[in-house]
Amino acid sequence: MVARTRRKPPWVVEKERQRKAEEGRTLWLFGLHAVRAALLNPRRARLRLVLSRNAADRLRDVLPESGGWEEADPRRFPAPLDPQSVHQGAALETRPLDWGSLEEVCAPRGDTPVVVLLDRVSDPQNAGAVLRSAAVFGARAVIAPLRHAAPETGALARAASGALERQPYLRVPNLARAMQALSGMGYRLVGLDGEAAQELDAVLADMTETPLGLVLGAEGAGLRALTRERCDVIARIGGAGGFGSLNVSNAAAVALFAARKSGKFDTNMSG
């Protein structure tokens, strides 16, 4: 009797397909600042480096002595970039960075770290600006869902102005479950909403010295219902007048500064 081979459920097959596709995915970083930061990062794979002569001169101090890059005319640049991309004659094909799991990166190690969670922030300019602020103010990680959030791209790297190479950007399958895991590690999760009754400064002043997660929603839509439910408290950034709310990247910068100023959290100002 021949044993039948059990077929995998469709969701398992799809999950394996997505994992294989992600493992083989490459991206193009562009612009002098982003490419320089990537070349200085030993974790970055260098699959193809395309430079104009002028860009090569400006990046000479970080280029390998053995070469390994191709010179190109900036007017007929061969890298497959969006025509609107301001590449400045520099582009690097690479793979997404693997920072490790949520538990590996965010688990407290006798300290009180700060993390930023982005709920469906899909604009790479906003996400990149958040990464830059997170790096400046010493956040442990920026966490976003795999779907409906800005992926690691050249546009994101350019907006992050080098921060993508040093600031962990964790893409998780499910943001609500990630928040639950952070709560299990001892994090207190503070959702930001311009209509909240409590101000962020007052919330931080009342907090014990526990790890902090700052949770921000997308422009317009704000925090989703389940994301809001997972927060321990909802707070707003206090302003001087009734003009309106900050956009998500500015709100992240102000909230991170407030956390640092409170003195209750371990942050490392990296500049």
Image (tube, rainbow, N blue to C red):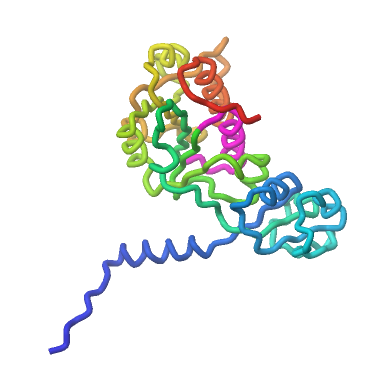
Q: Which image quarter holds the C terminus?
A: top right
Identify the residue at horizontal 55%, vertical 30% (top origin).
138
Identify the residue at horizontal 40%, vertical 25% (top origin).
190
Residue 192, compared with residue 178, is above or below; it is above
Is residue 124 inside the magenta stretch? yes
Residue 108, compared with residue 259, is above or below; it is below
Q: Is residue 40 visible to the viewer in this orientation of the structure?
A: yes
Residue 227, compared with residue 201, is above or below; it is below
> From the viewer's perspective, is 30 left or right of 119?
right
> From the viewer's perspective, is 115 left or right of 26?
left
Most frequent secondary structure within the magenta stretch: helix
Q: Is residue 191 visible to the viewer in this orientation of the structure?
A: no
Q: Depth check: 169 or 14 in front?
A: 169
For residue 71, what is the image quadrant?
bottom right
Outermost residue to the bottom: 1
Q: Position of residue 157 (x, y in %)?
A: 64, 46
Q: Which image quarter holds the N terminus?
A: bottom left
Residue 207, compared with residue 53, is above or below; it is above
Q: Which residues are magenta?
A: 120-139
For residue 18, what is the image quadrant?
bottom left
Identify the residue at horizontal 45%, vertical 28% (top origin).
113
Q: Position of residue 245 (x, y in %)?
A: 54, 22
